[in-house]
Structures are given as C-alpha cells and as structure tokens.
C-alpha cells in the first residue's frame, strides 16, 4: 500500500516535471509567475522541471528497491510538511491568491497528511509487533 501511494505521488511529480519543462509559459502563468527571458526561463526549467523530476524519481524508487520505502516516505513527509508550512504562511502574508494555488495547497495537505498517517500507522504496527 505504501509503495502504491508513493508511486502515485512520484507519477504526479513526473507529470509536473514534464508540464514545467515542455510548457513553461503556461505552467508559470498558471501559478502566477512571469518568466523573464533567459535567466527566468532557465531557473524555472531547472527548479520546477529538474526538481520535480528528482522528486518523482525518489518517490518511484521503492517500486524497484523495497528497502527504500521508509526513506522515500520520510522524504515525502519532510518535503510536504515544509510545503504545507510555507504555503500556510503565504496565505496569511499575501492577498490575491488564485484558485490554482488553493488547489495546490489542498494536494500538498493531502499528501502530507496521508504520508504522515501511513508512517505513524506503520511505526505503531512495527512497535506493537516488536513487543
């Protein structure tokens, strides 16, 4: 079940990497960025295309190596916990936030809460069976 969850998250990140890499103008406008030619386009490609691809690979990795399931799950919790924290702060700091941003926030919260719940459930069952 954990591997399936991580595979879904990883697949979402691969799709985001493709979207950010092959349609940066559309993607950036959707999230409220205006890309400056040259450096802005390069940064968006690297940070959004490259980083999303790396995250996709990390979350898909447990499909090939069962031993890294816990590692990928912890990375998922840490990463989405940080996203949730900063997204929530942003909602208090900034006005004029559009619906796409709220949709992203909802997805980040869901992934964070599901991954945290799975981790806590797994830890509880491991602790119980060790007794």
Image (cartoon, helix red, strand yellow):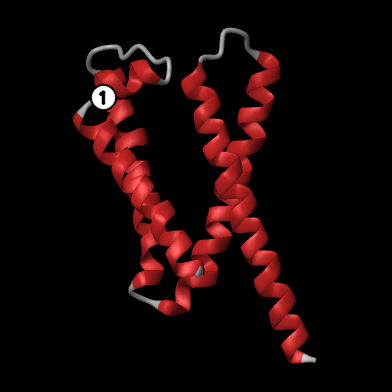
Residue nearest the observer in this picture, 131 or 52: 131
Q: Is residue 20 visible?
A: yes
Q: Is 66 positioned to the left or the right of 23 in the image?
A: right
In the image, what residue occupies the spot 65% across and 20% down?
91
- Of all residues, the one furthest to the left in this rendering is 22
In the image, what residue occupies the spot 36% across and 34% down?
47
Q: Is residue 71 above or below residue 87?
A: below
In the image, what residue occupies the spot 55% across and 25% down?
102
Residue 87 at what x, y percent from top left? 61, 29
Q: Is 47 positioned to the left or the right of 24 in the image?
A: right
Residue 78 at what x, y percent from top left? 60, 51
- Of all residues, the one furthest to the right in this rendering is 131
Q: Is 71 positioned to the left or the right of 84 in the image?
A: left
Residue 38 at what x, y percent from top left? 22, 17
In the image, what residue occupies the spot 51% across and 68% down?
2
In which quarter of the view is residue 75 placed?
bottom right
- SS at circle 1: helix
Q: Is residue 11 above or below residue 87?
A: below
- Of all residues, the one furthest to the bottom in this rendering is 131
Q: Is residue 41 visible?
A: no
Neighbour class for label 1 at 10 Å: few (<14), some, many (≥20)?
Answer: many
Q: Is residue 60 above or below residue 9?
A: below
Residue tagged by mark 1? 24
Residue 104 at what x, y percent from top left? 50, 31
Quarter of the picture containing the C terminus is bottom right
């Amino acid at each position: 079940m954990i591997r399936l969850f991580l595979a879904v998250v990883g697949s979402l990140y691969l799709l985001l990497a493709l979207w950010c890499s092959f349609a940066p103008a559309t993607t950036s406008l959707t999230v409220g960025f205006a890309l400056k030619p040259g450096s802005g386009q390069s940064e968006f490609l690297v940070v959004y295309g490259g980083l999303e691809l790396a995250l996709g690979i990390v979350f898909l990795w447990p499909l090939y190596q069962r031993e890294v399931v816990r590692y990928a799950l912890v990375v998922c919790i840490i990463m989405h916990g940080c996203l949730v924290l900063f997204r929530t702060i942003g909602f208090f700091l900034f006005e004029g936030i559009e619906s796409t941003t709220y949709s992203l926030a909802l997805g980040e919260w869901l992934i964070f809460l599901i991954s945290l719940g799975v981790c806590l459930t797994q830890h509880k069952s491991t602790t119980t069976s060790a007794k």
